[in-house]
Structure formats: structure tokens, C-alpha cells
Image (cartoon, rainbow, N blue to C red):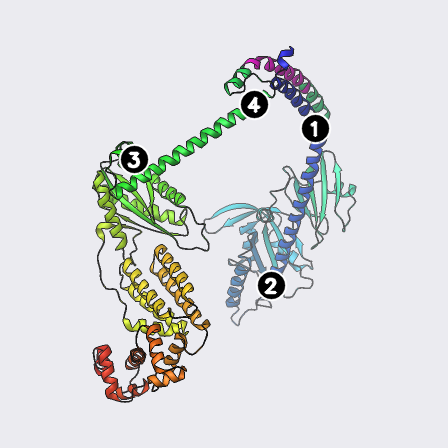
Amino acid sequence: MRRFFTNLGMLQVFISGLLVIVIMFVSTLFIYRNLISGIYEKVSENNGLVVQSIVQSLDNSFRTINNIIYTIHRLPPYDSLALTADNHVQMLKVQELVQNLETLISTVDYIEEVVVFFDSSNLAVTSKGTSSFDLLFNTKYNHASYNADYWRAYAKAQHPFKLFSAEEYTIYSETNRQTRTENLIMAVAGNKMSASSKQIIIMINSDALMKHVNQQPMIPGATLTMLDQDRNIVYSTGKQLDIVDILNEATLSANADTSLTKENFEYNFYYSDYNDYTYIEKVPYRFQNLGTVEKANYMIMLLACVSAIVVAVSTSLYMHRPVRKIIRQLGGGNSKGDDFRKIHSGIVKLQSENDTYRKQISSYDAEQFRYIFLRVLHGQLHHEEHDFQMQKYYTRFFSEKYFVMVKFELDVSDEGTVSVKTVEELASVLQEGMSQLQLSGTVIYDHTAYIALIGMKAPEDKDVWLRRARQSLAGLGKHELNGYSCRGCVSKVYISELENCQHAYAEVNNASLHRQVNEGDILLDAESVRLVWNAYLPFERLEKLSNYILTGKADEGIAIIKQTMQENIARNVHYYQLEHIAKTIFFYLINIAGGLGNAPQQLYELEHEFLQQLDSRSNGAAIENALVKVAQHLSRLSKTEPKNKLNPIYIAQYIELNYMKDLYLDHIAEVMETSPKYFSYFFKKSFGVNYVEYLNKVRLTHARELLKDTNDSITEIAEKTGYSTLSSFTITFKKYMGISPTDFRKQIDL
């Protein structure tokens, strides 16, 4: 026997079995002796909190009832419904009262109806209209005891506000001429100190009231009874209690909750802070007869101990040899010690190694397939060393006789709220979308886009697939790709041959390049691409834009950028054309701003950031925002530039503010505190044009605006823009614009 217990693992099995028995025995005793009572106390405590919450909800409900009664007293008519001269009731006042009653109780779901009547009239006004008082309580709301005569007599007597106990009423529906029964609590307004002569009865649906206060969390089998100030039962959720005996045995106090234990039940008393009502909760008392259960438990534990000992010994003997063999197989030899720990560590090691190898093989296979796929697209796979690889992946390329190629472009459209995914995660999302469409193919990431070959059994399947794919992409955009903008291009149908992959790749790239900015199709068919050449970028706007930015007028410059971009978007130009326009504007601004003294490094960083943003933007509004940020940055840069006079910013600002004056070269050189020769050299180096040409462009920019926006004469415009004579203005205007000022204005009028 000793040799078996030299095996530490077998000894652990034996000791573990005994330990389990001890723990089970002790824990069972604890449960039956302590835990059940503790559970009951905890449940009882929580139930008390629930009942207190229900009492507060009932108080709030009665406050609502009281507020409704108070409001009805203050509603017109304030007196009894006096008759008119021809002995008719003033129905306009009645109709107004009906509408007000309907509004009052429309939001209170536990009010069945509200009835307003006067001692001097048989007319009963409700939220649904008017009725005879006798008809209302003898037919529509029928009760053997509480009929019309009873309520009329009760109303005439002096009485306070009172809740009548819940009774079953037979309710007649005039719409479908059928009857139903409901438990109603009648709330009758007091008339001892009434604010008006109205008599008010509010019918409360007791079932709806208890649903409103939510009694569901109470202990199963518990009931709640509500008593009014006079200790009369108003409502009970179960069989009505013997209130007399319970109240006689209980010591009630209006300032504290009390409890009473009687037979197998516990009675808890709660008091309202609002209307002096008493609530009695009846709950089953704590579990009884635990002794018999404990004796049975002792016998079960004794049998379990004997059985566990037998099982532990048998298991130790039976598993000795198999365990030793397993350890040797896992490389443990014949060493003694904790056998099961050695087995576990050996298995964990094998699993870890297998997982590592599996991931490496999977990663290598995926990367190898991507490498082969991209080489096929770029026509670089016709080498002998790749023949075997191509045979391996051929079925993954072409699963059907035909195929279409799809190019997906994804971009983050809301960087502040979306969690950016890796390219592998995005490829997995697109792959899952294809799987949902029951299509075969693999999505591969290619630099800035995702490429997929979709198998087609027949060319005519393309239209059906396109419709389904557009719906799938729209669904992905709302869920998995929320926060991303997605656009795609689909090639025509090709026969499944390697050389056709290159043609399809070129086709989807060309379609992506020629996508129009207002193209609403999320998945564009390359065969439907239309070519347009109507991009718009007038040179005079660039001049005005540069002047505004260099002089710190960011808002005016941004307005020109937005106007130019929106006009091109309205023309529905190709996306690559819009990018070229944006780059032209950007590099024109950068060229003008290049002379800033401290700007070269900042301008380099600005250029790098702008081009990166341009590559990742997928719509015209995003490109426009990127340009606006550039304009704002350059405007701030111009304002922070040191204001020494011989400075491009200062020179541009001075010319913009004084272009209408006689700014001859000697004068402005004197203003800049330098010689005319050096100023001319500095200006040409900073602005790329000579001073006179730049000055004429600034003046003519303002002249064109005056010609378009005012009715001033040509002579007046010449004087306002700094030209001393009309002839010099006309000659200069025609030199730069190609037409005379008069003809320019005529073209505008046309």
C-alpha cells in the first residue's frame, strides 16, 4: 500500500475527497441553522423597503387626486349651472367643463372617471360628456348599494373627503353595448369647506392604482391592506383581514412603524405621512420545522462520507499506473512528486505551443496569399518559383466561372466619436458582410483600399448582387462601420483567368479616380462612369484669397474657399479634379506665404498634414474643411509675424490699405525705410512678381468688384483704384484682363 501513496497525486485525490465531505457537512449545517434565517431577515428587510416605497407612491397618488379636486373646484362655472331665460342649462359652460375634466385626468392612468354634479341639478358632467345623474349611477356604473339615490343623499349631507372601499362595479359601454366589471374606489370630495358648490366624485380603478405603485417586488404570498383615518378598510390585495383582532393585539403608534406576529404570519404596520392612513402588510413568518430537515441532513452526510472514502481509495488505486504512463509520455520520467501538477503543466505547454504554431501558420498563410494576390494584380506573378503557390491558392482566387472585382475605400468620417479600427479589423468586417451575402471571395488590404474578387456563376448575376451588396454596405455603415464613410467601385464581369485580374484592377482604380463628388451610389458600377471636364477655379479669386490671408482677413478668405469648393461640387466634377483644385489653392497660398521669416518649418509641417488629410478624405465637405484649416493657420501666422516694415506681410497689408493712393516705387521704398533698388529686389524675391505688376493686380481686383457691384462710372472707378487718368486705367485693365472695362461691365450685364 505504501508504494501507491508515494505517488503524491493519488494522495491528493484521497485527501481532496475527504476535504470535500468535511466542507459539505459543515456548510450544510451552517445553511440550515443560520443561513436560511439570515436570508429570511434580509428578504424581510428588503420587503419592508419595498412596502415603504409603495406607501410613498400611494401618498403621491392621493396628492394627485386631491390636487385634481382642488383644480375642479376652481374651474368655471364657479356656481351651480343656472338656467337661462328659456330654462335651458348653459351648455357652453358645461362643454368647457367637460374639456377641462378630460385634460385633467388624461395623464392619470388609474382614474376611471371623474363626475361633477350640483345639488340643484340632475345633470352629471364627466370627462366624456354629460349624462343624467340617475342614468350614470344606476346603469353605466351599477352597484347594488351605491346607486344614484345613495350618492345624492350622501352629497347633500355635510362630509369630509372620503375614500369608499374598493367594490365591484358593473360598467356599461355605450360604444359596443357590452358590460364589464371593475374594482373601483370612490373618492368623494368634502363639502364642509368647499371652494365651490360643485359635488365631485373621482372613480379610481384599484387594479390600475396598484399597478401604478408597482407591488410586484413584494414577497410572494404577502398582502397589503389600506385603512383610512377611521380604520376602515379601503383596499386589500388579498383576503380581507380580521382587523378588529389584529388592531386589538397591536400597539399602534402614529410616530413609528410596528410589527405583530400571529400564528404563521407577521403583520407589519406602516403609517402615511400625508393622510394618516394605515397600511398593514401580511407576510409569511420565518421557515418552520427545521429540526426534521437537520436530522435527514445528518443521515445524508454520513452516507456521503462513507461513499466518498470508498471512492477516494478506489480512485487512488485505479489511477496509479495510468498517471505514471501519462507523465512519462509528457517527458516527466519516473520522478516522484506532484503528478497531477506535472500533467497539467505538460498539457498547458503543449496547448500553448500548438496555439503558437497555429497562429504562425495562419498568419503566414494569410500574408502569403495577400502577397500572391497583389502580385497577380500588378502582373508580377509569372515566375517559376510561384507556380506551386499559385496552384495552392487558385481556388481562393476563382471560386466560380466568372468574377467581378470590388475596391472598397474606408475613411473615418467622425474622428471624435469613433473607435478607429485596424486594417485587419476593417477587412474582417467587409469579409463578414460578404459572408452574409453568401458570396465567396477574400478581402485584401492594398495600400489605401480593400480589394476583393467576387465569384459569379453567370454575368447576369451582377445586377442582383449589386442590389444586395448596396443594402449590406448601408447596414454595415449603421452598425459595424458606424463612424466610417464607405465607397466602392465594381468592375464589369470577367472570365476567371489571371490576366483578367490586372484588367479588372485597372478598371476599378480608374472608376475610383473618376467618381464624381456628388455620386450618391455607395457602390459604383465602373461601366456607368461618365467623364466630365468642367472644373472651376478663376485666377482672380486666387489673387483675392491670397490678399485676404496675408492681411489677416481670415473670414473673407474662408468665404472664397467655400464658394469655390461649393461651386465645383455643384458642377459635380470628378473627385480627382476636386483634389487638384484643392492642391492648387493650397500651393498658391503656400507660395505667397513662403516669404514669412519664421514660417518655413511650420509651412512644411502644414503641407505634410494637408496632403495626408487629402489622401484620407472621402467627400467634398471634408476637403473643404482641410483647406479652411490651412487658411486659418496662415492667417494666424501672418498676424504673429514680426511687424518690421521690410516684411512681406507688412508690405501686403500696406498695399491693400493704400492701393488707391499714388504708390510709386520711390514712395513705398521710403515708407519701408530702404532704397528703391533693394525694395524692388526684395519684393521680386518675396512675391514672385515685380512691384508694379503686383500693385496693378491688387487695384484691378478691386476695380472688377466695383464694375460688378456698383453703378459708378469708369472714370470714378479709375480714381477710386489709384489711377490718375482714365486712359491709363483702361490700358492697364485691357492688358491684364484682355478686354476694356466697358466691355467687362457689358459681359456682366449679359
Kindly check if marks 4 and 3 are in contact, taking CB atoms under 8 A apart as contact.
no
* SS at badge 1: helix
Q: In the rendered image, which quarter is residue 552 located in?
A: bottom left
* Span shown in magenta: 301-321
Which of the two discs, 4 and 1, labels the residue nearer the N terminus?
Answer: 1
Q: Residues within 10 Å of mark 4 (few under 14, many from 20)?
A: some
Q: Which is closer to the viewer, label 1 or label 3?
A: 3
Which of the two discs, 2 and 1, labels the residue nearer the N terminus?
Answer: 1
Kindly check if marks 4 and 1 are in contact, taking CB atoms under 8 A apart as contact.
no
**Residue behind mark 3:** 396
Q: Residues within 10 Å of mark 2 (few under 14, many from 20)?
A: some
Dot 1 amino acid type: Tyr
Q: Residues within 10 Å of mark 1 (few under 14, many from 20)?
A: some
The numbered mark at residue 342 is: 4
Which of the two discs, 2 and 3, labels the residue nearer the N terminus?
Answer: 2
Q: Which is closer to the viewer, label 2 or label 1?
A: 1
In whole angstroms, how far apart are the C-alphas of marks 4 and 2?
82 Å
Kindly check if marks 4 and 2 are in contact, taking CB atoms under 8 A apart as contact.
no
Which of the two discs, 4 and 2, labels the residue nearer the N terminus?
Answer: 2
Q: Residue at x 35, y 61 (%)?
A: 623
Q: In the rendered image, which quarter is residue 590 located in?
A: bottom left
**Residue behind mark 1:** 32
Which of the two discs, 1 and 3, labels the residue nearer the N terminus?
Answer: 1
Check the picture and name the quadrant holding the N terminus. top right
Q: Position of residue 446 (x, y in %)?
A: 33, 46
Q: Is residue 65 left or right of residue 483?
A: right
Q: Position of residue 504 (x, y in %)?
A: 23, 45
